[in-house]
């Protein structure tokens, strides 16, 4: 066996080794909620409210199919007016820019050979926010060489086809989520299947490298990533958590991959030394408040996006404990039916 094969086998074993089985989720809904709340602290209340709060009361049986819980992959009835979602772009690090909306983030990582956009927001907002945002920042959207799409929901993949069509941008997503895209994204906005990222793959452009980890849960092939930025010349490591909400059918087995991914990604974050957390929804990582703080930042102030590895681990613990609460709550509901 060649060395490369041995390494590949080792990775497979270590991934399989952190599998979570139902019987390993011990504790009650309340104990998991308490653990999530403690981990969230005052910093990640939006995350707690979004994915934990619904388990504070006993679950009721879901409404018939077609009603209730949104799938997350659906297309809105029509584009809302820009006044409801437009925000100005912002430089966040020496080589990272926010080009998203009030509620959704797109990030532009500049490199020595072009730009990588991480998440592409919606089809109706990509031009205003990503393209015109880059221009306002003095950057050239024609330099967008890659779009790394965390997962195939319209709020993150929606702008990918536009970038493909206008700039020849290569679109990177997991094979699993390309399959989701083919099944669920309307053809009008669906990008052509392009680069399929596998777990542990790297995306390199010029002097920047993004390491991509498959963290299934929110979707079958959600990508969470690790990469470097600089703040006034000082290097920092970014960790993203590519999918957040439990938008899947509320069945116990659907929470297990999410729990497994959160546990596994915590190890990735620990090893990476990441000290910056970025979400693709502005509420979860406090992007709007952080950008407001950056606009009045004094030379002695720290960059508010640099929160340290302990806080990132607390974020992932919050997500994991909420998923465990969801697992126990939906198990209990299933048992009572
Ligand atoms: Zn999503």
Image: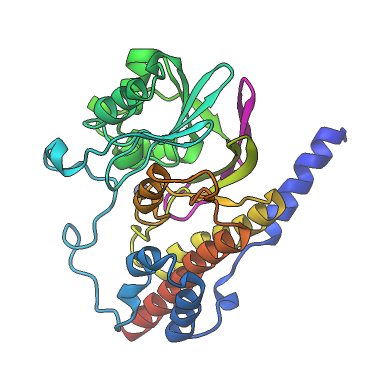
Left or right placement of residue 310 versus residue 303 in this view? right
Residue 100 percent coordinates (x, y)? 33, 38
Q: Can residue 116 be seen in this view?
A: yes
- In this rendering, is residue 35 above or below 132? below
Q: Which quarter of the rendered picture does the N terminus lie within?
A: top right
- The answer to if 320 sits in the magenta stretch is no
Quarter of the view holding residue 211 = top right
The coloring applied to the image is rainbow
**Disc count in the image?**
0
| Nearest the eye: 316 or 45 | 45
Residue furthest to the front:
299
Instruction: Please provide the residue range marked out in magenta.
Output: 198-221
Residue located at (33% from left, 42% from top): 153
Residue 150 percent coordinates (x, y)? 45, 41
- In this rendering, is residue 86 above or below 35? above
Residue located at (29% from left, 45% from top): 73
| Nearest the eye: 154 or 35 | 35
Residue located at (63% from left, 32% from top): 202
- The answer to if 213 sits in the magenta stretch is yes
Residue 131 percent coordinates (x, y)? 32, 23
Residue 126 percent coordinates (x, y)? 29, 29
- In this rendering, is residue 257 above or below 280? below
Left or right placement of residue 250 versus residue 315 in this view? left
Left or right placement of residue 4 versus residue 39 in this view? right
Q: Is residue 256 visible?
A: no
Left or right placement of residue 193 versus residue 85 in this view? right
Q: Which quarter of the rendered picture does the C terminus lie within?
A: bottom left
């Amino acid at each position: 066996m060649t060395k490369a094969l041995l390494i590949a086998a080792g990775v497979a074993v270590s991934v399989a080794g952190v599998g979570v089985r139902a019987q390993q989720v011990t504790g009650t809904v309340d104990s998991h909620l308490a653990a999530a709340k403690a981990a969230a602290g005052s910093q990640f209340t939006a995350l707690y409210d979004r994915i934990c709060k619904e388990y504070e009361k006993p679950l009721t049986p879901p409404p018939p199919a077609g009603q209730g819980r949104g799938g997350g992959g659906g297309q809105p009835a029509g584009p809302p007016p820009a006044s409801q979602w437009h925000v100005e772009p912002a430089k966040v690090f020496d080589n990272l820019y926010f080009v998203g909306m009030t509620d959704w983030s797109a990030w532009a990582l500049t490199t020595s050979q072009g730009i990588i956009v991480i998440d592409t927001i919606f089809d109706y907002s990509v031009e205003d926010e990503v393209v015109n945002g880059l221009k306002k920042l003095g950057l050239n959207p024609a330099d967008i060489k890659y779009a790394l799409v965390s997962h195939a929901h319209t709020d993150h993949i929606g702008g990918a086809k536009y970038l493909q069509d206008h700039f020849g941008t290569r679109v990177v997503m997991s094979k699993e989520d390309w399959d989701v895209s083919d099944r669920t994204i309307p053809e009008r906005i669906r990008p052509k299947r392009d680069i399929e990222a596998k777990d542990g793959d790297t995306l390199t452009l010029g002097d920047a490298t993004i390491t991509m980890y498959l963290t299934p849960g929110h979707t079958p092939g959600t990508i969470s990533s690790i990469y470097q930025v600089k703040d006034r010349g000082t290097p920092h490591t970014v960790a993203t958590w590519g999918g957040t909400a439990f938008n899947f059918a509320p069945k116990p087995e659907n929470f297990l991959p999410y729990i497994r991914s959160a546990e596994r990604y915590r190890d990735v974050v620990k090893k990476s030394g990441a000290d910056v957390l970025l979400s693709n929804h502005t509420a979860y990582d406090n992007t709007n408040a952080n950008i407001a703080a950056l606009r009045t930042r004094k030379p002695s102030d720290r960059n508010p996006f640099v929160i340290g590895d302990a806080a990132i681990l607390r974020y992932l613990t919050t997500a994991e404990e909420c998923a465990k609460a969801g697992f126990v709550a939906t198990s209990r509901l299933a048992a009572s039916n």
